[in-house]
């Protein structure tokens, strides 16, 4: 009888357990793997980060159940950062016209092809995926990536500009005529 009462109390814990994370990963398999792939740009690394994410999450014992999905995403992001160690290669500010464009673009719901996102440099890709696709704040991105908020802001603007140019080129590329 005591064992039954103890298990009921244990089930009421506000913290996520292995079963909760198992459900998060099984229900969100496609989206979580896609996140891992977009960050790493490579299926082998994506699988490694994804598998490490599962392992890290099931070993975590202090995450509220309501935060389990967000924690799973964050864990995948952290594993991808550890795997690729993306660093900013920019040291100068972008023109205000680009920053203005980036602000307008991030407010719209633009859709970019996976191929275009994968063509971004590692740091740009991480910043774009984290700040635009996953809606992490600039501050949160800077903390996770170990850089300044201004580096994240400038890199996001540059990534959006590159992606917009890719979309523009794809839209306006004339079809080649075949003889």
Image (cartoon, helix red, strand yellow):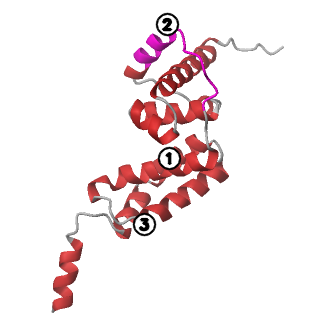
Q: Quadrant of the N terminus?
A: bottom left
CA distance separating discs 1 and 3: 16 Å
Q: Residues within 10 Å of mark 1 (few under 14, many from 20)?
A: many
Q: Position of residue 130 (x, y in %)?
A: 47, 36
Q: Which residue is mark 3?
A: 58
Assign a secondary structure to mark 1.
helix
Crowd rating for badge 2 (residues with CA inside 10 Å; few <14, some 14–19, many 20+): few
**Label at residue 97:** 2
Q: Is residue 154 above or below residue 141?
A: above
Whole-angstrom CA distance, mark 1 to mark 2, is 30 Å
Q: Please name the residue that numbered disc 1 is placed on.
A: 77
Give the residue displayed 53% in from the left and 9% down from the top: 95
Camera-nearest residue between 130 and 114? 130
In the image: residue 129, left or right of residue 120? left
Q: Secondary structure at mark 3?
A: helix
Residue 97's spot in the image, x, y percent?
49, 7
Identify the magenta region. Answer: 88-105
Q: Earlier in the sequence, mark 1 or mark 3?
A: 3
Is residue 89 rendered magenta in the image? Answer: yes
The residue at 80%/16% (across/down) is 178
Residue at the extreme right: 179
Where residue 7 sits, quadrant-wise, is bottom left
In front of the other: 18 or 23:
18
Residue 103 location, quadrant: top left
């Amino acid at each position: 009888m005591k064992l039954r009462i103890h298990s009921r109390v244990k089930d009421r814990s506000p913290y996520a357990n292995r079963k909760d994370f198992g459900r998060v990963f099984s229900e969100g398999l496609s989206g979580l793997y896609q996140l891992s792939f977009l960050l790493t740009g490579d299926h082998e690394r994506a699988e490694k980060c994804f598998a490490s994410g599962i392992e890290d999450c099931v070993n975590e014992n202090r995450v509220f159940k309501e935060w389990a999905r967000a924690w799973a995403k964050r864990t995948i992001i952290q594993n991808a950062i550890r795997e690729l160690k993306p660093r900013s290669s920019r040291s100068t500010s972008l023109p205000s016209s680009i920053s203005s464009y980036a602000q307008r673009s991030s407010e719209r719901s633009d859709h970019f092809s996976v191929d275009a996102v994968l063509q971004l440099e590692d740091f740009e890709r991480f910043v774009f995926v984290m700040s635009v696709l996953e809606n992490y704040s600039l501050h949160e991105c800077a903390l996770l990536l170990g850089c300044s908020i201004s580096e994240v802001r400038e890199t996001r603007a540059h990534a959006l500009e590159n992606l917009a140019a890719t979309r523009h080129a794809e839209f306006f590329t004339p079809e080649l005529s075949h003889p």
